[in-house]
Amino acid sequence: MTDFFQGIDAATYEGPDSTNPMAFRHYNPDEIVMGKRMEDHLRFACAWWHSFAWPGGDPFGGQTFERPWFEGSGFGDTMALAKLKADVAFEMFDLIGVPYFCWHDADIRPEGDSFAESKRNFEEIIDYIGTKMETSGKKLLWGTANLFSHRRFMSGAATNPDPDVFAWSAATVKNCIDATARLGGENYVLWGGREGYETLLNTDLARERQQAGRFLQMVVDYKHKIGFKGAILIEPKPQEPTKHQYDYDVATVYGFLKEFGLEGEVQVNIEQGHAILAGHSFEHELAMARALGIFGSIDMNRNDYQSGWDTDQFPNNVPEVALAYYEVLRAGGFTTGGTNFDAKLRRQSLDPEDLIAAHIGGMDVCAAGLKAAAAMLEDGSLEAAREARYAGWDGSDLLDSDLATIAARVEAGGIDPTPRSGKQEVLENLVNRFL
Amino acid sequence: MTDFFQGIDAATYEGPDSTNPMAFRHYNPDEIVMGKRMEDHLRFACAWWHSFAWPGGDPFGGQTFERPWFEGSGFGDTMALAKLKADVAFEMFDLIGVPYFCWHDADIRPEGDSFAESKRNFEEIIDYIGTKMETSGKKLLWGTANLFSHRRFMSGAATNPDPDVFAWSAATVKNCIDATARLGGENYVLWGGREGYETLLNTDLARERQQAGRFLQMVVDYKHKIGFKGAILIEPKPQEPTKHQYDYDVATVYGFLKEFGLEGEVQVNIEQGHAILAGHSFEHELAMARALGIFGSIDMNRNDYQSGWDTDQFPNNVPEVALAYYEVLRAGGFTTGGTNFDAKLRRQSLDPEDLIAAHIGGMDVCAAGLKAAAAMLEDGSLEAAREARYAGWDGSDLLDSDLATIAARVEAGGIDPTPRSGKQEVLENLVNRFL
Amino acid sequence: MTDFFQGIDAATYEGPDSTNPMAFRHYNPDEIVMGKRMEDHLRFACAWWHSFAWPGGDPFGGQTFERPWFEGSGFGDTMALAKLKADVAFEMFDLIGVPYFCWHDADIRPEGDSFAESKRNFEEIIDYIGTKMETSGKKLLWGTANLFSHRRFMSGAATNPDPDVFAWSAATVKNCIDATARLGGENYVLWGGREGYETLLNTDLARERQQAGRFLQMVVDYKHKIGFKGAILIEPKPQEPTKHQYDYDVATVYGFLKEFGLEGEVQVNIEQGHAILAGHSFEHELAMARALGIFGSIDMNRNDYQSGWDTDQFPNNVPEVALAYYEVLRAGGFTTGGTNFDAKLRRQSLDPEDLIAAHIGGMDVCAAGLKAAAAMLEDGSLEAAREARYAGWDGSDLLDSDLATIAARVEAGGIDPTPRSGKQEVLENLVNRFL
Amino acid sequence: MTDFFQGIDAATYEGPDSTNPMAFRHYNPDEIVMGKRMEDHLRFACAWWHSFAWPGGDPFGGQTFERPWFEGSGFGDTMALAKLKADVAFEMFDLIGVPYFCWHDADIRPEGDSFAESKRNFEEIIDYIGTKMETSGKKLLWGTANLFSHRRFMSGAATNPDPDVFAWSAATVKNCIDATARLGGENYVLWGGREGYETLLNTDLARERQQAGRFLQMVVDYKHKIGFKGAILIEPKPQEPTKHQYDYDVATVYGFLKEFGLEGEVQVNIEQGHAILAGHSFEHELAMARALGIFGSIDMNRNDYQSGWDTDQFPNNVPEVALAYYEVLRAGGFTTGGTNFDAKLRRQSLDPEDLIAAHIGGMDVCAAGLKAAAAMLEDGSLEAAREARYAGWDGSDLLDSDLATIAARVEAGGIDPTPRSGKQEVLENLVNRFL
């Protein structure tokens, strides 16, 4: 045991009336919701990068967090630091009782002086994590490659004007899929952090799209070749870091998948914050993914509606979270996916206790949201109202007709549509009854 | 002749040094730009709705314009008013020398008490306009149906929960395509002003998408059935009037077309203001449409970047317009499409002179932008720089490879990408040289 | 009794477990919260304009609501319609149990052909309303003048380039203050719907500011002259309808009041939606008004965070509303102010039932928010944490010092600040405990 | 001479037809514009921080620039690096011919282990810069203190909950003012990068405002005490890095100055990008500062309208820049202020040439904008139209009247305002004539 979380006990469920700030008031893993354990519904995962690798910097200020596993702490060499970081991570997974975690390669291993050295570092730490997984029972929700932080990726990874960067990226993804498979990961995620552009003036949009499409086909081929059973997921985001990111939102990703014949192979990992930045509600993106048949997993970190960048905050608004899980439940719940907190502490939240409390609060908000969503679905009033609104279509053969036939019918008279109330406020009140 | 524009002479080209506010300083229809007459490049069109039908209202105030063809003017019955409106419109087309115009059915004909009566009104006014086209030589760039203003469309047209509204909409579009064909229109446009939703709580996203897809297939089938040679265009917009509009942006429309097998049949009409509201630059949407093979036509009206609704202003920034025409020229220029001003006068701009001056100014800005774009393209430096940036891909067979092969190559060493400057500022300076 | 709300009973409090959509689950007027009746805390008011005068139009579509008091209904002349509207309004006040209402002059009286005729209409309807107030016990929270809808105000009211419009506006406000006083109104509000500009090119910012300042001084003088005891309130809004509205936000209004020596005379009426449009949270604007000593009243209608115009929706998110009332309570609660719903039904919500349900839902959300806010304040943990954060300042005389003295002290060593956690997530969790 | 800019010659004016990417086409320092040398109008300044200290990182990626003066270059110790940085800076000032520069303390000196050591480093480098100024003739436009990057400032500087941070900040500003005075700086700027909050839950808004007000009073007192003749300037920004920054915009700063009696002592440094982020146009903020009598200086770096964070790009749109200088000229031009480029290269712009080209392009855009603005002002049409619009007020004594008197006059009839066109499009066309 490290002493990082010294004095902090494992969080337990104490019920809604608890005033213990380090206990769950709503998240009760074994509680049955719609016939399934709450833990199996929510499938919580921690993000290595924000919780253990991010130093607290922003564009106007540097590191605020002081962690013993950061360089300069004096603890040891970079590999020793990486292992200490893993030790602390697994201690946190235990303290808060999350079953899953996620990583980028760059979060868990030190960068080497060459591709080969980085790979050796990576494989050593993957083994180390694998051992810890065995003893802890924790599982890998997804792995992913960081193809955006190093300056070599500044002009893109798969979409780089330089084929050598494409190659470097392909090799990196190959190793990350291998590691994900090796650890029994349930998904593999691609977030194209630099797949986009800063200025159209130097960008060949069509060419970069072809590169991205071919890259993704290679990823899917490789998955099948090695028999990796996890899902391949793309994570949409509209902008930041680049001015325009290619995987703008769910609908954009769908068109991309269709163009390259991959709509049956690849799904989406939807983040609340990215949905917001794209001008959508989170539930919109979830409903759209469901309608298009590409729903995969979620990142449950909110964005400040009024900050124009990715704020990656822990969720704290139960009504909003409930609407999101309502769509997840309507989509049949998660299969390989889960609820990942791609969430940063605020940079002033310096204490180890903050890291634990933030996750506890986020998990509790999700649990409360899930229960409300399930209650709404079981109540059935909302779905009954929705179906009633479209009831006129039952038995209609209008969609089998054609313009001329329909026009003749309308011109003959007898069709004069009567507007009916959309009942938005009534339905909003209905939702509030479950919150 | 009506006396609406009394005292205003036809605008002529007087060259860049002219101080005549009612003359063109840049738009010279017969001037040859890249081997084509400027008029044939730009293919300007006036929008009936904003210029002749809109009364100047906004959500906080009513009519400001007083036009003799508005109800209550005492000029005559509604059909007489519609004809007066058409007379004035054609007078304006002459005064400013635009070759094209566009309409919604609701702009040009009085609403009747029944579908049949509206249709009769419509056909009478179409005949009236047809006669005026013959004498004036003016042409129809596109027709479209207003399926959003009347309360019957409040919950959508093709995507309405009520099949009767679908039917009414289908019949309306059939008549509008007929009329467009009758007048030799070069395109038919669909803007789904109410195809979207106000709240997900009462909306079946998947079902409405199927309705919309089937509707569009019927439109395409009908076009072929009657032998209409014009292009079918969808106009994307992200929101307003509904909270979420289905045809969000170019990439979204592409995915929709792919789903319904219509990507070879339907193109897009891209509006600067709608691009802005979707979080894109205008040139992004144009470049994207070109890359996806669905570029059709443009609405050249700008949005205030800082107003969150459709401000529909006449263009006035030459550098921005130049970048747009640069993409149009790279796409090979317009075929059936053109430059429509879907632009409103500001509601304080009461005078007939304002209407003329606004169009003259907008046309001049477009002409200046086109000339700058052509000069950039002919100069070739920008395209040479773009090609040089991707030159590493020439002859590369990397895209034919696979992850494992590439990874083996990278791990063997020898590939260590060297970042190269993206030269954004240098390219921006280069563009400014042509403005 | 009119038959508009036929079949709808008065809403009563049935408690949190009620499933009756037309009953209160949280709003219990006589329940004591922090020593005061809930009704006296919240001081709910209905807005005449949205609930009774607005026809359901938006920039892309016309009237959707069909009300017997709208012109064309055949009910009677314009004054009869205005009285019917008042009858229905008071019936709704009874059905939902709100103690207050608000109006613009233009909401309640027909526009006349002259100023004098409008005034006569207004005075007749004021008398009519006065009589209804006596029998119903309902009260006027505030009156205000509509100086933005008529085309005469298109370029501003007090800030108009034409002094005649200034005069017309002054005369109108005089009459509205008289009427407000006559009805025992507790406040008089000024929202400068056209006090702003569309383009700086035709605007003399400095001059218009002087006009607005002088206008407000006249209003304050008149209030004192006639002995009106109510508060004068300015309602900030950043944009819409004009591109830039002068009363941008609370801080801007404060600077304006200071310039004209009115900061002790005028307070602010803060709307959630306007706060959002200005880039602030509602609670920010409330806290700022409290800090500046100008807190007056609130409009409790939310804006969609992702729509760039005033959506004026009924509140439906309890956590957000709780934070707002927390600031209201910290400011000492309302004195003359109250909770006005400046909220529109969605334009598809056609039914009389929708109007009632929307208010019930909004009132319930406010009641739940108030109770949570009171519980937080009574618990004291949040305030204790806030005070502890600043405890280092207790007894400090640093603010009495000067730069040179302080610098000498710091350079001498001994001061090296240690960052302390800001505890944001812990505090957010704490808040969630009360929701 | 260092060899950083090896092979790059000093930029000279070659006129509008030059195709030399490293020459000025518009900026001709000695050219007379409205009776003053262009250089004396524009008063260009370079920003040490972005051009020499920023490594090219963003929230998703690290350093891209490799500069010999960055740590790890092997060139020497931190003070040697700081001097090399200064050498290169002055070489650039010469190459592009800017007369001024600006710095934060943290840009120019290495951070020490203690306040005293940092101060010693600072004073040594100030001497070094002073010597270079003598030989080069370059001048200091303004100095400022970086009170936001170091973790000690994470919760604010003057507004910190910890008085020790207030003290540290006060001492730092004292030293920075001393240094600014020592180098003959013409202004001293305060940008409150952390003066704001992340969450209201832990923030005492009123208390922090008092701290900020008192801090500013101390600054002004100190300025007078040491006889510093430069102007004290506050730089507004609405958000980022904090969720809410106190110095939101010009109007907000004005209210703050009024509260603390400093409106005659402090002016504003307005940045285009910050104006945009606050929802204003740049020219709005300039006109507002002029109207309020607090116009000081500008940061002429643009923001991408569609990116929600500070993009700090070099200006490249002449029409926009022209409108800004038009307001500067109307305000009488700069006195102590100037045109600072607080502008970052894009992080892909790696080459020394990019740094030079970006400044040349920016300066050229400003020069073209200035000339257009001067021509508009000399032409006089725009100002004549503005005055004509308000001509009705000439000789009016309406503002000396009172509500009752005015109302009597209006009710008596005879006043019925006639709307007049605002002529926005005509004026926009007029502006375009000068571009």
Image (spheres, coloured by chain):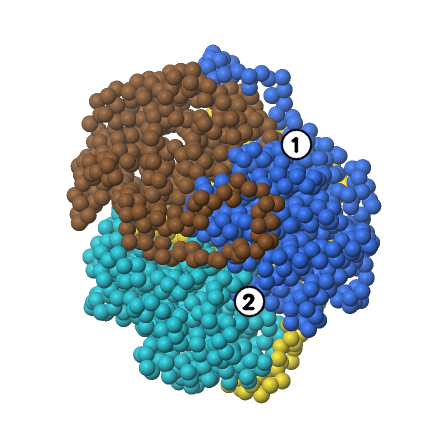
Chain colours: A yellow, B cyan, C blue, D brown
**Residue pointed to by mark 1:** A8
Return the x and y of residue C251 as percentages of the image width and height.
Answer: 55, 38
Can you say which quadrant of the picture contains the C terminus of chain C?
top right
Q: Label 1's element?
A: loop
Q: Residue at x 42, y 48 (%)?
A: D391
Q: Nearer the viewer, residue C25 or A280?
A: C25
Q: Relative to C354, does residue A364 appear above or below in the rendering?
A: above
In this view, the mark in front (2 or 1): 2
Can you say which quadrant of the picture contains the N terminus of chain C?
bottom right
How packed mark 1 is, by other alpha carbons closer than 10 Å (few <14, some 14-19, many 20 or more), is some
Q: Relative to D125, does residue B94 appear above or below in the rendering?
A: below
Can you tell which mark lies on residue C61?
2
Q: Chain of mark 1?
A: A
Which quadrant holds residue B7?
Answer: bottom left
How packed mark 2 is, by other alpha carbons closer than 10 Å (few <14, some 14-19, many 20 or more), is many
Q: Nearer the viewer, residue B383 or C324?
A: C324
Q: Chain of mark 2?
A: C
**Left or right placement of residue B101 versus residue C224 in this view:** left
- Distance from disc 2 to disc 1, alpha carbons, whole Å, reads 59 Å
Q: Residue at x 22, y 56 (%)?
A: B17
Name the residue type under label 2: Gly
Name the residue type under label 1: Ile
Return the x and y of residue C240 as percentages of the image width and height.
Answer: 52, 52
Q: Residue at x 50, y 69 (%)?
A: B192
Residue B122 visible in the picture: yes
